[in-house]
Structures are given as structure tokens and as C-alpha cells.
Amino acid sequence: MTREEKSQVIQDLTAQLADTSTIYLADISGLDAITTSNLRRACFKANVQLAVVKNTLLEKAMEASEKDFGELPDVLKGNTSLMIAEAGNAPAKVIKEFRKKSDKPLLKGAYVEESVYVGDDQLEALVNIKSREELIGDIITLLQSPAKNVVSALQSGGSKLSGILKTLSEK
């Protein structure tokens, strides 16, 4: 790779890092071609981009980025695959589901909404992160609950009141 090509790759990676808020670093070394192809398909279905990157280029892109990646540059050793997604928990779900059939990919680290997670032991915490849409749905449900209670009380109270008035008028 020439210097110009490396510079272009660093610029492209820096732009990708700036445009997304969810970045996972995983180790998929040791997977054969068929398994790697299946992993790529699973990532595609879950709307996750999967790319194998050179550690030094990714580290330089992280340094050039305005975001604070904390300890993530320290985990850039060995083979590294970059997983980028819109939903914070999508790559974690793909990794967890794929591990039912294989012992890889291993999670090296993740950057999700300005939070840094390092190590494979963080996978369960990342799977349980709710996406933005799920949080909005939970908030709407919480806001609708009291309104539904008031409406149902008014509706049931109206039928009771009309029943009492009808009984009184009959007497």
C-alpha cells in the first residue's frame, strides 16, 4: 500500500467514525471462508457493516477523529474487524447469536453513544442496551398509561351515573 492509499483509507475511516455512534471491534480470526461468509450475511440482515481493517490505520483514524474512544486504541492487536451499525445493540446481538454455532467472533471493544466498553465480558451488557426507538416506545407507553386510566374511569363512571339516574327516575 502506498502512502497516498493509506492516507485515503485513514480519511475514509475517520469519516465513518464521525458519522456513526456505534462501533464494535471484534476478532474473527480463525473462521473459515464459509463461516465468515455466514457471519457477513448475518451482519447484512441485521443492518451491520462488517469490515476487516488494519490496526495502525484504524488507530490513526481514531486519533484524527473528534470523538474520545478512551481505551479502544489499546485493544487494536491481532486481527480486528470493524462492525458499524445504527442501533447500539445490533452488532452485540449478531455476535451473541453467531456464537451459538461457533466460538468466534470475540468482542474486543465497543463505542456506543459516547460510552466505551472493553473486553468480551461486556457482550451481555451490550445486548441489553435499548435502541433509541425502543426507548421512545417505552416513554410513550409510560405517558399514555395515566391518560388511559383517566379515560377508562370517566367511561365507567358515566355508565354508573346513568344507571343510578335511571333507577332513581323509575322510583
Image (cartoon, helix red, strand yellow):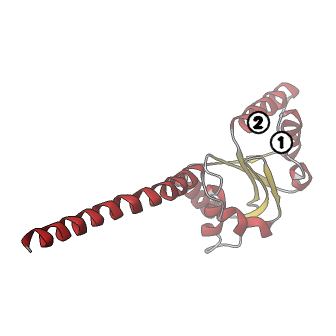
Q: Residues within 10 Å of mark 2 (few under 14, many from 20)?
A: many
- Residue occupying the far right of the picture: 74
Estimate the x, y position of residue 137 in percent, counting from the top left. Answer: 51, 54
Estimate the x, y position of residue 53 in percent, counting from the top left. Answer: 78, 45
What residue lies at 60% left-to-right and 53% top-to-bottom?
131
What residue lies at 66% left-to-right and 72% top-to-bottom?
102
What residue lies at 86% left-to-right and 42% top-to-bottom?
68
- Residue occupying the far left of the picture: 170
Separation of residues labelled 2 and 1 (CA atoms)? 7 Å
- Residue occupying the far top of the picture: 4
Query: Residue 58: which disc?
Result: 1
Decide which of 150, 100 is in the foreground and name it.
150
Three-letter amino acid code at disc 1?
A: Leu
Residue hosting label 2: 13
Return the disc, 2 or 1, that comes first in the chain's sequence: 2
SS class of the residue under badge 1? helix
Could you tell me if the residues under marks 2 and 1 are in contact, i.e. CB atoms within 8 Å?
yes
Three-letter amino acid code at disc 2?
A: Leu
Estimate the x, y position of residue 12 in percent, counting from the top left. Answer: 74, 31
Q: Is residue 75 left or right of residue 32?
A: right
Q: Is residue 145 left or right of residue 2?
A: left
Decide which of 166, 47 is in the foreground and name it.
166
